[in-house]
Amino acid sequence: MTASAAHCADSFQLELEGVSRASFVTARGLGGSRRAFVYREGGAAAPRQFRGSFEFSNLILERGVTRDSSLFDWFRSGEPRSGAIVLLGGDGRELVRWTFARGWPCAWEGPGLDAAASTLAIERIEIRHEGIEWASR
C-alpha cells in the first residue's frame, strides 16, 4: 500500500475523553431528524403540523482491526464520554470537527473471519449520544 493510499484510509478520526485518537475509514450518522407533532383543531379542514423533538442519529464508525483494544474496553464499560469526529484533509490537517456530548457505545462488532477471503478485517462501533455540534476550524 502506498503512503497516499494509507493516508486516504485514515481520513476520519475519533477523539474521546480518556481514549487515544483512533482513525477510521468510514464515519456515518452525522445527522438527525425532527419529529412532527400533529394537532387536529375542531372544524379545520387539515391538521396543523408543529415541530416536535429533535433526535440525533447514532454515529457508526468502521476501521481496520488494530492491536489497540481501547474501543472494545470502552464498549464493555459503557461509560459515557464526550468526543469528536474529525475530518482530515489530504495533507493531514483538520478540516472540520463535529463534537458530541455524553456518547456511549451501544454496539461493537469485530471482524468477520474467513481464511479463504482476502478482505480487510473491519471493526465497527456504534455510538449513541446527546447531541452534535459543528465546530469547523
Image (cartoon, grey):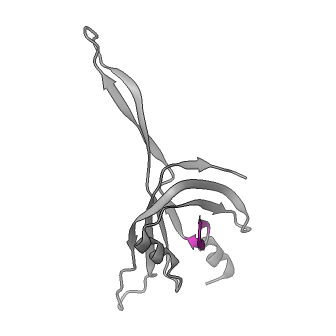
Q: Residue furthest bottom?
A: 115
Image coords of residue 64 (percent x, y): 50, 78
Is 20 on the left-hand or right-hand side of 51?
right
Is 116 on the left-hand or right-hand side of 5?
left
Q: Residue furthest left?
A: 43
Q: Residue furthest top?
A: 43
Image coords of residue 44 (percent x, y): 28, 10
Is 114 on the left-hand or right-hand side of 58?
left
Q: What segment carries the magenta color?
A: 11-24
| Front-lying residue, 119 or 87 | 87
Image coords of residue 12 (percent x, y): 60, 65
Q: Is residue 23 magenta?
A: yes
Q: Is residue 12 magenta?
A: yes
Image coords of residue 5 (percent x, y): 63, 76
Q: Compared with residue 118, is residue 70 higher up or lower down, i.e. above or below? A: above
Q: Residue at 63%, 61% (x, y): give it.
A: 86
Q: Residue at 28%, 18% (x, y): give it.
A: 40
Magenta: predominant secondary structure element? strand
Q: Compared with residue 44, is residue 65 higher up or lower down, i.e. above or below? A: below
| Front-lying residue, 52 or 48 | 52
Q: Residue at 40%, 71% (x, y): give it.
A: 108
